[in-house]
Image: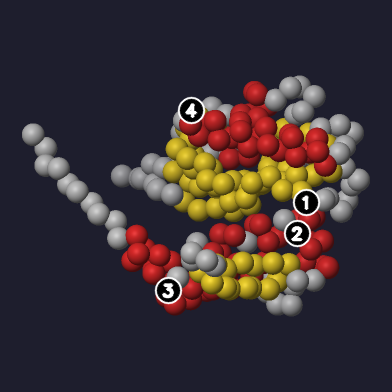
Amino acid sequence: MTAELIVPPDSVMAVVRELNAALPTAERAAGRVPSPRPKGKFVRVRAAGGAPASLVHVTPTVLVESYAATDGDADDLARRCHAIILRAARNGWMGGVPCADVGVFAMPADLPDPDTDQARSTATYAVTLRAA
Amino acid sequence: MGTTIRIEVNQAAIREILKSDEVRADLEARAKRIAAAAGGEPDYEVDVRWGSTRARASVRTATFDAIRDEARNRTLSGALDAGR
């Protein structure tokens, strides 16, 4: 008998869906920088490795980068994203995916992007999700 | 009726463990693995020190190239798993 195939969930899309369900339409989240690049606020979610947590759970490292015209706006957006992500952990669901826990590697911090004049605030999370 | 289990935490012993040579060495080894995964010296430096309540280790960008690489590609952030 062949063992069941257990495919880990798409952590980036889970976080993107969770953020977009809560953020205003002018502050959309995506897995890559939209084209054309928005002049206002947007959020980029990136995967950065991680590890299995159990047979059916994974804990990917997720980078959340909040862009805006000013440092203050980028920090404000990043802190709201932070709140949305932690709330998802308390609710047990992240963008429709069962979420067991969210660990915070790093709270939002200013990290200028050398490729643009926009301000950027970044935070790093360990999101424990369950395979469907 | 269930059995009551009482746990007493020895706070002084925990503080001693957090500042022990063994914990410091473990943290240093983890930090070195992260630095190596990111690209190693001279671009990334490891610092280990005694904090007021525990041993601490950090990895930091040490060159302009590493700073730019972290800002553009998040190379050091992506190397965190090496410290598990």
Viewer-side label of 3, 2: 3
Residue at x 70% of width, y 77% of height:
B41
Type of amino acid under label 3: Ser
- Label 3, label 2: how many angstroms apart (C-alpha)? 32 Å
- Label 1, label 2: how many angstroms apart (C-alpha)? 9 Å
Position of B27 with respect to A22 (left or right) is left
User: Which image quadrant for residue A33?
Assistant: top right
Neighbour tally class for label 4: few under 14, some 14-19, many 20 plus, Cα within 10 Å: few
User: Which image quadrant for residue A17?
Assistant: top right
Looking at the picture, do discs 4 and 2 lie on one chain? no
Type of amino acid under label 4: Asn
Residue at x 65% of width, y 24% of height:
A22
| Nearer-the-camera pick, A97 or A7 | A97
Residue at x 46% of width, y 51% of height:
A52
Q: Pointer 3 and pointer 1: residues touching (CB < 8 Å)?
A: no
| Nearer-the-camera pick, B13 or B59 | B13
In the displayed structure, B74 sits above or below B23; it is above
The x and y percentages for residue A106 are: 62, 50
Residue that carries the numbered disc 2 in the rendered image: B70
Helix, strand or loop at label 4? It is helix
Viewer-side label of 3, 1: 3
Helix, strand or loop at label 1? It is loop
Residue that carries the numbered disc 4 in the rendered image: A91
Neighbour tally class for label 1: few under 14, some 14-19, many 20 plus, Cα within 10 Å: some
The x and y percentages for residue B27 are: 51, 69
Q: Pointer 4 and pointer 3: residues touching (CB < 8 Å)?
A: no
Type of amino acid under label 2: Glu
Residue that carries the numbered disc 3 in the rendered image: B20
Residue at x 48% of width, y 28% of height:
A91
Residue that carries the numbered disc 1 in the rendered image: A111
User: Which image quadrant for residue B22?
Assistant: bottom left
